[in-house]
Amino acid sequence: MLKHPSGNYNFSIKSYHSDQNGKLTLPALFHFLQECAWDNARLNDFGYEFLKKRECILGFVACISSNGRISRVER
């Protein structure tokens, strides 16, 4: 069972998070959702530290270029 099944998060919306009509962009929304998911995983003890202790962190970084190609960069 999750210790913290849900949470409330507050984010400051900056001008670069919005489009020309003042609406939140989809990429900005996904960024905020990712921040919520990251914090929820941490609060429920299965975030980065949990994975690091169990050596589940990958030893590489994936770089995505503007043309959509994914390349692997060793750490």
Image (cartoon, grey):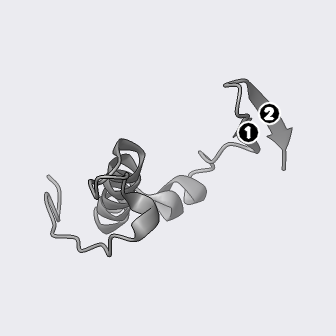
Residue nearest the viewer, comparing 34 with 45: 34
Left or right of 24, for residue 31 = right
Residue 70 image offset from top left, x and y in percent: 72, 27
Residue nearest the viewer, comparing 70 with 41: 70
The residue under label 2 is 72
> How many C-alpha atoms fall within 10 Å of the one at disc 1: few (<14), some, or many (≥20)?
few
Residue at 84%, 50% in the rendered image: 75
Residue 3 image offset from top left, x and y in percent: 17, 64
Q: Which amino acid type is marked by label 2? A: Arg
Q: Which amino acid type is marked by label 1? A: Cys
The residue under label 1 is 63
Q: Earlier in the sequence, mark 2 or mark 1?
A: 1
Q: Secondary structure at mark 2?
A: strand
41 versus 63 height, above or below: below
Residue at 78%, 29% in the rendered image: 71
Res 45 quadrant in image: bottom left
Res 60 quadrant in image: top right
Compute the Cα span from label 2 to label 1. Answer: 6 Å
Residue nearest the viewer, comparing 42 with 18: 18
Q: Are marks 2 and 1 in contact (CB under 8 Å)?
A: yes
Residue at 22%, 70% in the rendered image: 9
Which label belongs to residue 47? none
